[in-house]
Image (tube, rainbow, N blue to C red):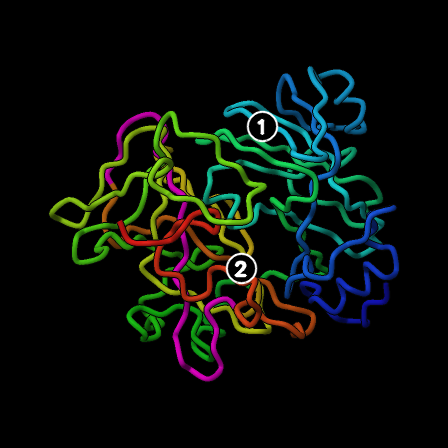
Amino acid sequence: MLIPEGREGVLPNSYLVRAINEGVIDAGRFKIPSENVQPASLDLRLGEVAYRMRCSFLPGNEEVETRIRELAIDRLDLRGDGVVLETNRPYLIPLKERLYLPRGVRGKANPKSSTGRIDVFTRVITDHSYRFDEIADGYHGQLYLEVVPLSFTVRVREDLTLNQLRLSVGRSELTDREILERHQATPLLYVNGEPVPAEAVTLSNGLFLSLDLHGDPSGHVGYRARENSPLLDLTRSDPLDPEPFWEPVRREGKDRVVLTEKKFYLLMSDEAASIPPGLASEMTAYDPTSGELRTHYAGFFDPGFGFDPDRRFFGSKAALEVRAHDVPFMIEHGQKVCKLTFERMIEEPTILYGREPASNYQQQTQALGKHFIRRLP
């Protein structure tokens, strides 16, 4: 796969299609669906088997298959109707896609937004690696997905897509100064349809987002996962009634919420993000120094999220997955809880997020994912 000399950044959809055609991304006897190619990422598919594991691991100097032989306690068939994955148990699933990256090309994986919103924890493991979700420059080999359902027991099957792959070359990350310059030229954050003033932007190795705890006129600000909910069948195509799975969360009088420890919440950002065609973004988890709060599974925002060149809308709010660790924890409206990092594209993609019917979260107004009927409580 030829990369133009001197180009640095994330590979767009046209390069991903080329990588598939040239066998850089390969699925053996399986065809990679064209609809799995996104503007700056590729949806990865579950393979035919899953392993119930004793524990999570990193392979270190070993191949992943060696660790599977040591640590697997059961082998499950994902074909047909699929299988049920229980909460708080690690499963390891070989993905259908394999990589044969040329020198200079590296990868990164993240859960899809819909996966994070149902509190299913995923991360990619590769051979001879000491890091999750990061795929080494020039890697040749299988990709494996660790899957841990946390709030809901779920049913999965072969070909479901729970995570995404992004490929890049060279120095792709923007510095804080570059982010601010981009924001001043083409706004990256809006509040109430107006660009956030440059002096109000908070930067520290990325662009911070804050919580919306004003909510709607009734005080509704988000959702909390119910205990003892029914099976969440991810193989269904029609959205489910959210009531058995989620309870509404309403603010207290001073635009604040006290989180119950270890419970999973879906909330919304106060700001609306806009990712222009020349940039890709990633939302990164943020832990306050106290360690009491964890916000957001890391996730990709592709070019076009919240972006409209015709200025019919100004950004899209982000859904935030929030959990307090060991004690109840108070959060307040406007509190900084996560941040966006940005990478340059080596060239603009030929498709943008939000221009296709499959774009589920453009101009979203609430945090429930695509698996549920999205309506006000």
Tell me which residue sits at (31%, 52%) in the image: 211
Which residues make up the magenta segment? Answer: 305-330
Neighbour class for label 1 at 10 Å: few (<14), some, many (≥20)?
A: some
| Residue 326 horizontal/vertical position (percent) | 34, 25
Q: Residue furthest bottom?
A: 310
Q: Is residue 59 visible?
A: yes
Depth order, front residue of 321/95? 95
Tell me which residue sits at (62%, 20%) in the image: 55
Q: Quick one: SS at disc 1?
A: strand
- Amino acid type at image mark 1: Val
Q: Is residue 89 above or below residue 120?
A: above
**The N terminus, quarter of image:** bottom right
Question: Mark 1 highlights which residue?
Answer: 84
Q: Is residue 183 left or right of residue 66?
A: left
Question: Mark 2 highlights which residue?
Answer: 301
Q: Is residue 361 left or right of residue 172?
A: left
If you read the primary sequence from the N terminus, does the residue marked by circle 2 or circle 1 appear first? 1
Tell me which residue sits at (47%, 57%) in the image: 340
Q: Determine whether label 2 and label 1 are within 8 Å by CB.
A: no
Mark nearest the camera among 2 and 1 is 1
Magenta stretch containing residue 308, yes or no?
yes
Depth order, front residue of 342/86? 86
Q: Quick one: SS at disc 2?
A: strand
Depth order, front residue of 278/214? 214
Q: Is residue 149 left or right of residue 316?
A: right
Tell me which residue sits at (75%, 16%) in the image: 70
How many numbered marks, from 0 up? 2
Q: What is the spatial separation of the Cα atoms under label 2 and label 1, in whole angstroms?
A: 29 Å
Magenta stretch containing residue 56, yes or no?
no
| Residue 278 horizontal/vertical position (percent) | 60, 73
Depth order, front residue of 270/373? 373
